Image (cartoon, rainbow, N blue to C red):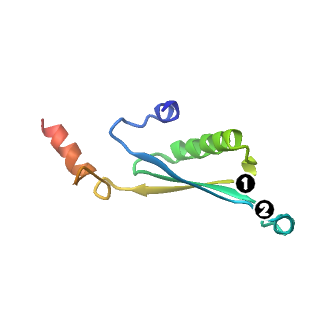
Amino acid sequence: MELLERFGWPDEDILDLGDISHSRGTESNAQEGGGSMLVLKITMMRGRTPEQKEALIAQLSQAAAKHLDWPLEEVRVAIYEIGEYEWGIGGRSVAARRNDARSH
């Protein structure tokens, strides 16, 4: 993904754009400030700088607004960070896989 390359995500790292949900309010709800919103939920490994997260939020929001025809001010982004011991691939944690790769 070009976007991930721009942020310097290593190939073995994880970024999951697994959940996009939205809520379109009714006209009366919108008048009361309820409006509509689009929520992008991102799960990724810990270790990114605040600047990288700000850039990711900005670019994902802009892309969603453009490609999903949604008002930018109604796009929300939630980042969930996990450690390498909390993410498993093929029955083993990312930490164990990385340790094996370093020792070979």
- Residue at (81% x, 65% y) in the render: 26
Q: Residue at x 42, y 37 (%)?
A: 9
- In the rendered image, the quadrant that contains the C terminus is top left
The kind of residue on which mark 2 rests is Gly
Q: Which mark is residue 18?
A: none
Q: Which residue is mark 2?
A: 35
Residue at 34% across, 55% down = 83
Give SS at disc 2.
loop
Residue 93: where, in percent of width, then height? 25, 53
- Residue 48 location, x and y as percent? 44, 46
Q: CA distance from mark 1 to mark 2?
A: 8 Å
Q: Amino acid at mark 1?
A: Glu
Q: Is residue 99 left or right of residue 79?
A: left
Q: Residues within 10 Å of mark 1 (few under 14, many from 20)?
A: some
Image coordinates for residue 17, horizontal then vertical, percent:
50, 48
Confirm or deny contact between disc 1 and disc 2 (CB under 8 A).
yes
Q: Tell me: 88 left or right of 54.
A: left
Q: Quadrant of residue 88?
A: bottom left
Q: Residue 50, how many percent across, how many down?
A: 52, 48
Look at the numbered disc 1 and give the secondary structure of its residue: helix
Label 1 sits on residue: 74
